[in-house]
Image (cartoon, rainbow, N blue to C red):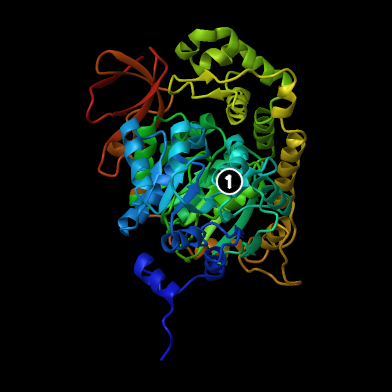
Amino acid sequence: MDAPDPLRTALAERFGHQEFRGFQREVIEHLLAGGDALVLLPTGGGKSLCYQLPALLLDGVTVVLSPLIALMQDQVDALRRRGLPATFVNSSLTRAEREKRVADVVAGKVKLLYVTPERFRKPEFVEAIGRVRVSLLAVDEAHCVSAWGHDFRPEYGRIGRIRDLLGRPPTVALTATATTETQADVRARLGLEGARLFAGGIERPNLHLAVREVASDDERFDRLVTLIRGIAGPGIVYVALIKDLRDLQDRLLRVGIDVLTYHGDLDPRERRRVQREFLDADDRVVLATNAFGMGIDKPDIRFVVHAQVPGSVESLFQEIGRAGRDGAPSYCELLYLEEHLSIQRQFVEWANPDARFVRGVFDVLARWGETLHARELDDLRNELLVKNRSDGRVETTLALLTAEGVLDGSFERRDLAIVRPLESGEEERVVSSGKRDRDLRRLLEVVRYVQESGCRKRAIHGYFGLDWPAGRACGACDRCADEESVLASFEPRRAASAASGDDAAPVKVGDWIRVKKRFVVTVKSVTRKPTGGWVVQGQSAGDFKIRAYDLGKVGWERMG
């Protein structure tokens, strides 16, 4: 008779799985023995279990550092549905809720605590966490630690200090996307030079990868229509700019294709509504900026299309990795229009303000003094930006100064405050030397991927420093398989997704309407509800805020 296997028993009882995947068991055993680890697994590869199961078996609390509030909420909700003792503490909660949850942690009622790195700026939180035993530190989306990574978040640069604050517990850093250069930087910043590397490869055999070079925006649009109509099931279309996303939605509605939209200009309630509708439906398509997807746990996404060039191969790989987590065939295509490279080049400039700009931001905030709490982000943009009000350098600088402890709070919460002066010459240190050039080189690698004449999966493996067997064809990319045959193998979308006649949208993007007989708004997006009717995102002419209006529930009239 076989001896009992405690880990398999815990896996079955706590998570309902009968077998570990890949090297999950090796990682878990290593962490339970007190080791540090750097884990590289593709999106959907089972990274979370690598720290969630040890957390339940170790004495004390496991602290999980996560970059996004929505991401941690989804993970905690999934754990709670299984009856597992997990919670999160972040700014989405009221003060009373935060205090109650921290008290539960101190009382030993919680095994998994999800927080953002920013939470460690709160003295009361640091004092409370100092009263518990932290048995494991998990750093999710660890590539955000590195200024060399594709999604650097300044606050993540403080995690090395947070680890010291927690007494340097065993630590696991997890990511799906890290080049060898980024891996080395993560190790150095977290003090994980001796951590064991677990690299599971990045191949997802069920994902078909393709690139379609297009000569015009019309050609790009026609191809997108072909893909949406040709592949049934949920899909994500990534667009870099919000204004282009809105234009694309309007054009799709005009040809009878109904889509959801998700971007940073939507209010939080509308973003949650869109996300929930996408997760619950079996055939919805969402047009989204890269703000959508991290933490989206939907196994049956059948296609991911990049309608504009992504900023890096890492971003491309992370986003296509959201398709086909159920193991069924899924299609991923990049629509490459060369002129779109200028969008990403502009993003690189916005993500890399120079020292002079950083000093300028601080000087304006200091000059405002006691009136700072009454100011808005647009006031700061108006002071510093002459031509392009959408220039993102202001937001980047605020994040950098907050990570350095110069600022605290935010314009959105109306609690932005100067904590300490920006010392003379400190702006030079705040700005990451060489990051702009690395970001531009990363964009060049996307162009190389587009122009790749051989197997695309081999090219991606090479980019991440992983081996690929000589002469092997993946059979699942546009260089190794017949493209039209692959597309023909998918079930086409049902005609019911089209809108025509009386079911066509009553307004279009750009229209002016009057809502509730007094609010004049311009239409920014139009979304059909599954139950019938239409929801409009409209920007008010009075305060310029964007709000959602259900046209079937509010009185409205077209203007002009």
The amino acid on which the numbered mark 1 sits, given as a three-letter code, is Arg
- Residue 356 can be seen, yes or no: yes
The number of numbered badges drawn on the structure is 1
Q: Is residue 163 left or right of residue 13?
A: right
Q: Is residue 314 left or right of residue 267?
A: right
Residue 90 image position (x, y, % from top left): 42, 37
Q: Is residue 273 above or below residue 493?
A: above
Task: Check disc 1: other Cα within 10 Å, few if <14, some if 14-19, many if 20+.
Answer: some
Residue 145 image position (x, y, % from top left): 62, 43
Res. 153 image quadrant? top right
In the image, farthest residue toward the front: 131
- Disc 1 on helix, strand or loop? helix
Residue 548 image position (x, y, % from top left): 33, 28
Viewer-side residue, 388 vs 147: 147
In the image, farthest residue toward the bottom: 1
Res. 58 image quadrant? bottom left
Q: Is residue 381 above or below residue 392?
A: above
- Residue at left 49%, top 66%? 489
Quarter of the rendering occupied by the N terminus: bottom left
- Residue at left 73%, top 71%? 469
Viewer-side residue, 538 vs 61: 61
Residue 301 image position (x, y, % from top left): 45, 55
Q: Is residue 533 left or right of residue 57?
A: left
Q: Is residue 277 above or below residue 546?
A: below
- Residue at left 73%, top 59%? 465
Quarter of the rendering occupied by the C terminus: top left
Task: Provide the residue designation for mark 1.
Answer: 163
Viewer-side residue, 83 vs 534: 83
Viewer-side residue, 293 vs 122: 122
- Residue 387 can be seen, yes or no: no
